[in-house]
Amino acid sequence: MKILLFGKDGQVGRALQPALAPLGDLIALGRAEADFSKPESLAPIIDELAPEVIVNAAAYTEVDAAEDDREMAWTVNAGALGVIGQIARKNGALVVHYSTDYVFDGLSPDPYPEAASTSPQSVYGASKLAGEVLLRESGARHLIFRTGWVYAPHGRNFPLTMLRLAQERDALSVVADQTGAPTPASLVASITAAAIPQALANPAKLGLYHLAPIGETSWHGLASYLVAEALAAGAVLRATPDSVQPTLAADYPARAKRPANSRLDTMKLRTAFGITLPAWQDGIRQLIDTLRTEGRL
Ligand code: NDP
């Protein structure tokens, strides 16, 4: 099976490479080889490589910058998906794509199921939702995994930022009124690899899924846990769990609006693919372990 991966250098893209390689012949492309700001340029690349599966981990993910760079966010997150969908449909390829809890307004008191009505509050969220719609409407066979709060041992993400700040500062102020589930890129990758053969074998499994670990926390809860676990693992930090202070999102005005509730209901994913999801804390402990092993913490 030939698999074409777009966005190989991102958090999820990097995790996907070892996860997808055992499934077949993997061709991994980054921005230099496949530029999503020119969606029409993707068509000949896909046609020439003729993959059976296209996995798209490329996206415009700068949530605040997208507010001022609307056209580019829409081109990369939506326009490119229209092109990928059309070519995949023509060639009979399966498309695997990722989306976000930012398609919701975050006002629901409960975790969001796939069927919940969408109401994006930011350019990023609206562009990602448009990408979902264009892919679906292309008629290509597809899997879309909506996830949130993604992190990896590399790249720019909340856990790495918090650990750096905990090394530099005695006290941290962290938002306590937004909840979600911190999701390791490696979990997104392993579930993708497990789902692809199942979806190829059984079209009933195609479609939209919510992907997150079990449990929930706030950014403050996550920062406190990170500090406590890093200290327990022997890291030298200036901050302590007690010096991580809760604050309100309203005290940190950002360019783009973030959902207060980023929790995703994962029942459909677990049932369809027979997957047991780990607790969010497992991934955080693994991250600390990796950083310690690499001498970065
Ligand atoms: P990253 O920002 O780590 O990676 C995005 C990748 O897209 C980068 O490698 C980047 O290239 C590439 N890219 C950006 N613009 C272009 C372009 N014009 N042409 C080609 N490539 C481009 O994101 P993640 O790995 O975290 O995200 C993967 C998916 O998960 C995305 O669909 C995202 O929307 C979704 N998601 C992410 C969440 C998160 O918290 N990070 C939460 C929910 C969903 P380069 O390396 O050259 O910059």
Image: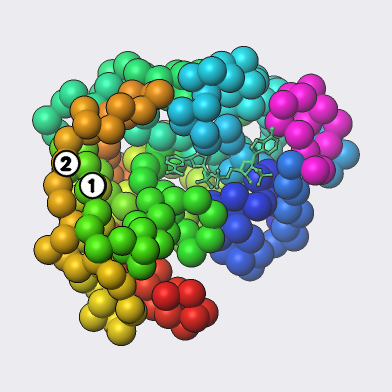
User: In the image, is residue 97 part of the stretch drawn in magenta?
Assistant: no
Find residue 57 and report its image quarter.
top right
Count of residue discs: 2
Amino acid marked by disc 2: Thr
The numbered disc on residue 66 is none
Quadrant location, the N terminus: bottom right
Q: Which residue is mark 1?
A: 174
Quadrant location, the C terminus: bottom left
Amino acid marked by disc 1: Val
Expressed as whole percent of the image width and height from the top left, the position of residue 231 reads 26, 77
Q: Element at badge 2?
A: strand
Dots 2, 1 in contact, CB < 8 A: yes
Expressed as whole percent of the image width and height from the top left, the position of residue 158 reads 38, 51
**How far apart in space, not on screen, are marks 2 and 1 (Cα)?**
5 Å
- Residue 242 shows up from this direction: yes
**In the drawing, does residue 201 fall left or right of residue 169?**
right
Residue range in magenta is 32-45
Q: Which residue is mark 2?
A: 247
Expressed as whole percent of the image width and height from the top left, the position of residue 107 reads 18, 24
